[in-house]
Image (cartoon, rainbow, N blue to C red):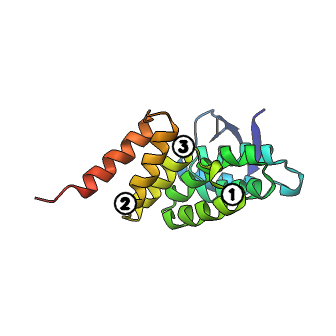
Amino acid sequence: MDDILEWEGKRYTRRSGKWVGSDHTVVPEILQDKLNRAYYETIDLSKLTADEAIREGDKFKSSASYGLAIKLYVYSMERASYKDAVYILPRLTSCYRAQGRAQDVIKMASMVKKRYGGEIFSPVLLTSIAAAYCDLGEYGQARKCCDKAYAMAGGHASGELSLVYKRIEAAQKPKK
C-alpha cells in the first residue's frame, strides 16, 4: 500500500520509497526530505511493531532521509529480538556513515557487543564497521574487521568487503 500525504495543499504518494506528485513524477530530493519530515510527524511510534518501524526506516533510508531512518532503526533496536537486531544493525550503520557519523558506528558496535555478545557480528555488519574505521583513518582496526568478515563468510569477499579492502590498501600505499 502506498503512503499518501497532503502537504501545503498538494497530494503526494510514496512509491518504492520515493514521493511522487500528482503528475506521477518523483519530486526533487529537497522536497523528498521535507515530505519525509512531514510524514514522520504523522507516525505514532507507540503503535508500531519493531518490524513496522524497520519498514518505515527503510523508506526514509531509500530517499536519503538518514536522520529519520536512524530514529526508526534506534526505536526498533530498543524493541528488537536478537534476530531483528541482526538485520537492523547494518541498516543503522549505513545511515550513520551516510551522515558522516563514523564514530557513532564504532560506539554502537561496542554497545551491541555488550548487549548481544560477539555472535551478533555478521560479515555484513563487520564490513560496515570496517568502512567506518576507514572513515576515521583507523586502517589497522578496519583490516581486523575485514579479516573477520572474510573468515566468517568462508573465504568469500562480498563486493562491499572487497571495496573496503581496496580502500585500506590505497590508504596504506606509500605516497609518491
Q: Which label lies toward us, 2 or 1?
A: 2
Q: Report the residue marked by disc 3.
A: 124
Q: Amino acid at mark 2?
A: Gly
Q: Amino acid at mark 1?
A: Arg
Q: Report the residue marked by disc 2.
A: 140
Tell me residue 76's x, y (percent). Answer: 76, 53
Residue 19 picture quarter: top right
- The residue drawn where x is 78% and y is 51% is 80
Residue contact between numbered discs 2 and 1, judged by CB atoms under 8 Å: no
The local crowd at label 1, few if under 14, some if 14 to 19, many if 20 or more residues have their Cα within 10 Å, is: some
In the rendered structure, which disc, 3 or 1, sits on the residue that comes first in sequence?
A: 1
- CA gap, disc 3 to disc 1? 29 Å
Q: Nearer the viewer, residue 128 or 50?
A: 128
Q: Secondary structure at mark 3?
A: helix
Quadrant location of the N terminus in the rendered image: top right
- CA gap, disc 2 to disc 1? 39 Å
Q: Report the residue marked by disc 1.
A: 37
Tell me residue 141's x, y (percent). Answer: 42, 60
Q: Secondary structure at mark 1?
A: helix
Asked whether residue 21 is in view, the answer is yes
The local crowd at label 3, few if under 14, some if 14 to 19, many if 20 or more residues have their Cα within 10 Å, is: many
